[in-house]
């Protein structure tokens, strides 16, 4: 096996391409952009676009997302290395300048002679992929917005959920006299711009949110949201204080010696801090309603919207039923599915999925099967979930419920220990099974 064709130059597709090429495999990476696949979501022409938040989540050493990132770093993730070069300050999180992240990834692809990167090429079925770009093996990594036609060519047994993205506003329209720079609990640098709300301001915002004009769902669509990505208005419908206990929680902030009633955070989108994401404010309000509602926030009265929030249907395959142990499709042994389409959820999870798929393919070409990372590792937890039969399989992201570490500890020490121990076990697994021995100079 020396030739692999990958469909989709997103996070999983790019990571897989770079990992395979680094091990001497010839890769053709096919990407539909800059032709618009889903205009409301993809904005950049380049590869590895972060479609919503520019955050690759926490770097705090007691968090599941840190554990997964550390495991990916041990395994030599190219995209996480790229992310580290284009960081923007965001407290304890790894946030990046999304344009530069895409450019950095493009630079890595261009520098790798084993990769042919073909843009502006959409392929809409597995048969068409095989016909047009013949290879020994295929990876479909077309992400959560995969077209129904392509999805149907993989399997009839597919699922979906809804996901929403938050608006991005320009720095120029913000009234900095009403906003303040701070990090929750003053833990790190004051990287977030914050908007403090009184009870009255919060109520006014929630009232406007509840009555705002929203886009309807089609009759046949059953809206199911992944918890973390629920539209802000759906959260508000669950209870008046859901936001003040959720994305607008004020703990860790003080204004003039007092905790505000609620705090809305704005996270810089780029190093220049010329654009800000309104954190946690993913929404399906119509654009006019977004302007009206978010401009009720103190300091955002003149906010200019660079990107509006929106809601999207995310597709994924029923992994436990469709994937073989090697993560290829049972019905199409020459084809792997990687990234969010395979049933993982999140940027880091998609990067990991691309990385692992590449390693599984290399192992197969050597006549081996890659053993699963230990159950105490976050990557091992994700992979086990993709294989666990469930009445209704739901996408899985890095969280402590998916790891299995029998060590019993007091609650206070548990997270820290489990992350450190999981990372240690991953390193051991990596050294025993892969190490650096098969990577080209
Ligand atoms: C609206 C939205 C918001 C999200 N927000 C977040 C977030 O804030 N944080 C987070 O951690 N995760 C988020 N996710 C979840 C998810 O992890 C990301 O979508 C992630 O980018 C998935 O990576 P991927 O590589 O699987 O797919 P993608 O990164 O989406 O890449 C797929 C690539 O395939 C290309 N493609 C698609 N169809 C074709 C075709 N037929 N032919 C050729 N090319 C094609 C696309 O152009 C794209 O470049 C979000 C998802 C969505 C849809």
Image (cartoon, grey):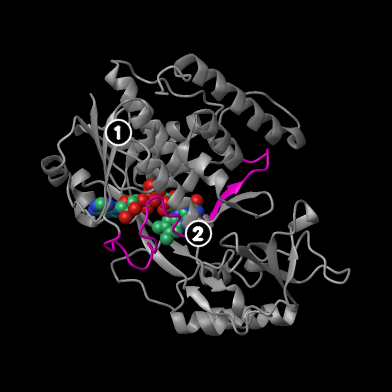
Q: Residues within 10 Å of mark 2 (few under 14, many from 20)?
A: some
Give 288 or 88, whichever is nearer the viewer: 88
Marks 2 and 1, how far apart at CA: 37 Å
> Relative to 395, is 52 above or below?
below
Tell me which residue sits at (66%, 23%) in the image: 407
Q: Residue furthest left?
A: 131
Instruction: Residue 297 in the image: state x and y as whole percent.
Output: 65, 79
- Choose between 346 and 400: the one closer to the eye: 346
Residue 165: image x %, image y %?
A: 47, 64
Identify whether 343 is placed above or below 37.
above
Q: Is residue 266 magenta?
A: no
Q: Quadrant of the N terminus?
A: top left
Under circle 2, the secondary element is helix
Q: Which SS class for mark 1?
A: loop
Image point (41%, 45%), residue name: 107
Q: Residue at x 65, y 55 (%)?
A: 90
Q: Is 130 left or right of 280, judged from the image as shown?
A: left
Q: Is mark 2 within 8 Å of ligand 1?
A: yes
Residue labelled with disc 1: 114
Instruction: Give the residue pinned by disc 2.
Output: 229
Is residue 45 among the parts visible in the rendering? yes
Residue 12 quadrant: top left
How would you classify the magenta stretch by its main secondary structure? Answer: loop
Residue segment shown in magenta: 34-63
Q: Position of residue 312 (x, y in %)?
A: 38, 63
Task: Compare marks 2 and 1 and give the one earlier in the sequence.
Answer: 1
User: Residue 35 or 209: which is nearer the viewer?
Assistant: 35
Check disc 1: other Cα within 10 Å, few if <14, some if 14-19, many if 20+.
many
């Amino acid at each position: 096996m020396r030739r692999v064709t990958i469909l989709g130059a997103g996070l999983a597709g790019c990571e897989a391409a770079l990992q395979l090429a680094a091990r001497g495999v010839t890769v053709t990476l096919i990407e539909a952009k800059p032709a618009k696949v889903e205009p409301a979501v993809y904005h950049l022409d380049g590869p590895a676009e972060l479609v919503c938040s520019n955050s690759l989540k926490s770097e705090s050493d007691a968090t599941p997302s840190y554990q997964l990132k550390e495991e990916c770093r041990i395994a030599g993730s190219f995209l996480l290395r790229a992310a580290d070069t284009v960081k923007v300050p965001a407290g304890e999180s790894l946030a990046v300048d999304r344009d530069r992240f895409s450019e950095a990834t493009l630079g890595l692809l261009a520098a790798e002679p084993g990769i042919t990167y073909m843009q502006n090429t959409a392929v809409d079925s597995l048969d068409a992929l095989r016909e047009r770009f013949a290879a020994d093996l295929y990876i479909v990594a077309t992400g959560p917005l995969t077209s129904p036609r392509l999805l149907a060519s993989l399997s009839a047994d597919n699922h979906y959920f809804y996901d929403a993205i938050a608006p991005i506003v320009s720095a120029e329209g913000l009234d900095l006299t009403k906003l303040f720079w701070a990090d929750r609990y003053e833990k790190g640098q004051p990287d977030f711009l914050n908007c403090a709300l009184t009870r009255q301001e919060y109520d006014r915002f929630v009232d406007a949110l509840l009555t705002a004009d929203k886009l309807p769902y089609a009759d046949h669509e059953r809206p199911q949201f992944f918890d973390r990505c629920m539209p802000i208005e759906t959260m508000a419908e669950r209870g008046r204080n859901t936001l003040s206990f959720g994305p607008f929680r004020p703990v860790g902030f003080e204004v003039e010696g007092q905790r505000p009633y609620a705090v809305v955070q704005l996270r810089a989108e780029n190093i220049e801090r010329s654009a800000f994401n309104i954190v946690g404010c993913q929404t399906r309000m119509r654009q006019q309603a977004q302007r009206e509602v978010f401009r009720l926030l103190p300091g955002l009265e003149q906010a200019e919207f660079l990107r509006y929030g929106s809601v999207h249907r995310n597709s994924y395959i029923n992994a436990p039923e469709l994937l073989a142990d090697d993560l290829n499709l049972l019905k199409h042994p020459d084809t792997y599915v990687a990234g969010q389409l395979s049933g993982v959820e999140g940027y880091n999870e998609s990067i990991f999925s691309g990385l692992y798929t590449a390693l599984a393919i290399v192992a197969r070409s050597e006549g081996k099967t890659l053993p699963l990372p230990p159950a105490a590792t976050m990557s091992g937890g994700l992979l086990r979930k993709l294989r666990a039969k469930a009445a209704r399989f739901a996408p899985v992201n890095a969280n402590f419920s998916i790891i299995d570490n029998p060590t019993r500890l007091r609650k206070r020490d548990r997270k820290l220990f489990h992350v450190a121990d999981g990372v240690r076990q991953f390193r051991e697994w990596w050294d025993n099974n892969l190490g650096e021995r098969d990577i080209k100079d």
